[in-house]
Amino acid sequence: MIDLKLPIDEKSIRKLKVGDEILLNGRLVTGRDTAHAWLVKEQPHLVRDFLKDTMIYHCGPVVKKKGNHWEFIAAGPTTSIREEPYQGTVIQEYGLRGVIGKGGMGPDTLKALAANGAVYLHAIGGLATLIAESVVKVHTVFKLEEFGVPEAMWVIDVRDFPAVVTMDSHGGSLHDKIFQHSDDIRKKLLHIDV
Amino acid sequence: MKLDFQDHAFRTAVLELIRRASTDLAPDVVRAIQTALENEDDGSAARGVLSAILKNIERAREKSTPICQDTGTNIYEVSLLPGVSMRRIEKLIREATREATEKVYLRPNAVDPVTGKNSGDNTGELAPYIHFVEWDVPAIGVKLLLKGGGCENVSTQYTLPDITLKAGRDLEGVYKTVVDAVVKAQGRGCAPGILGVGVGGDRSSGMMLAKKQLFRRLDDIHPDPELARLESRLLKDLNTLGIGPMGFGGKTTALAVKIGVAHRLPASYFVSVAYMCWADRKHSMRFSPDEVIYD
């Protein structure tokens, strides 16, 4: 297990390799479909400082308001590939050091990870209660009214959030490997000539 | 036969059904995940994922919080005696849904596709989705499935014959489409998945049939021996693909395959594949004025 403190510098990120198991600690920001479109189209300034050198978490949480502050109740990852059209631009434009989600991402993101020094971390889909327990503080939220709870950008502090590096900053991707392997077996099972 | 019941009693029972569906898994699903874990190698990523999943299930149950934050499309199948008003039942389910959202058993999950606005309470056009059937039992039977978007997005439909798969219009062709669908899904449907398969029908009835299979117990055996054989052959072969939990690799890619069939048009042969994530939130209850029995 590698303890990763956020925000983080490029050098530390470059050391990470596919297969490394991570415990995340520190600040990250949630963002999914609407947020990514917004970050690319409108290039808002208000979130820049929060994103620099940290990571975006593909997550639409279940939250509860207690008095003046918010609490995360359920917060597993959502499918990342939907952000593929935006992710490379967002990594570069906002200086992200990583993306956390599930299912992996495509070639454009893999290129952006290598070019900018960032990683893709895979969280466990459906691990909503455990990951919510790792959210120790909700700092602030952007676009809550306009985007709704799942799509808003929540700035949070996490403690020991578990994830695995499945795409690194050197062009490595576990997803490509698993796909190739399973597709070869598929061809055998279906008697399709390779 | 007649059924007299109070609105609030039924609404409260549905609210409890939603709470159970969101925060707990049925025993057959938990057992299947436990068996899968025992089957994976010590120290493997697959074993790590499955043990985290089991821990999450336990914590969600203890704290009564959602197992997964995507509390999904809420799909109901309601069985009624002749004469019980469907409109009344629908209204009460919608009210229970709003209350469940306030109590954060459900995430606000109903978005208007034109305005992009989230209704905020999980109700809207066809939300929740309710299918009614009639029965002869003096009670109201309610089945509920919470089906998340990740696994819904990898659900798919094939038209046979399919030349690229060399799949013809027979059960061998059905076999090939299901293998193909699971390889295309990789870990994105939150593997290990449960595959509901609808063979035949039209595009909508076929997919509905596929989803109905997801209400079956994972350890049941299809009454038709030929389909029972196909289900177990598919399960065995899917678990040789090496996709594994979350697509990290491993021996467990699927937990169950459940197949239903419907008559088709001579011109059409659809295979509908409804992929359900490991967080297989299917629950049911039988409501009568004196007691409510949950599965």
Image: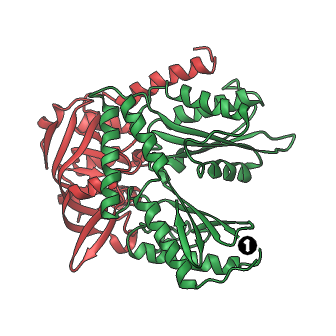
Chain colours: A red, B green
**A175 w.r.t. A147: above or below:** above
* Along the viewing direction, whichever of B1 and B277 lies nearer the viewer: B1
Quick check: can you spot residue A123?
A: no
- The quarter of the picture where the N terminus of chain B appears is bottom right
Which image quarter: residue B78? bottom right
- Is B71 placed left or right of B176 in the picture? left
Q: Secondary structure at mark 1?
A: loop
Identify the residue position indicated by label 1 in the image. Answer: B81
Using the image, determine if residue B189 lies above or below residue A191: below
**Residue type of the residue flagged with mark 1:** Leu
Q: Could you say which quadrant of the image residue B31 lies in? A: top left
> Quick one: label 1, few (<14), some, or many (20+) residues within 10 Å?
some
Question: How many callouts does the rendering have?
Answer: 1
Residue at 22% over, 62% down: A155
Drawn side of residue B215 relative to residue A173, left or right: right
Front residue of A118/B189: it is B189
Q: Is residue A46 above or below residue B7?
A: above
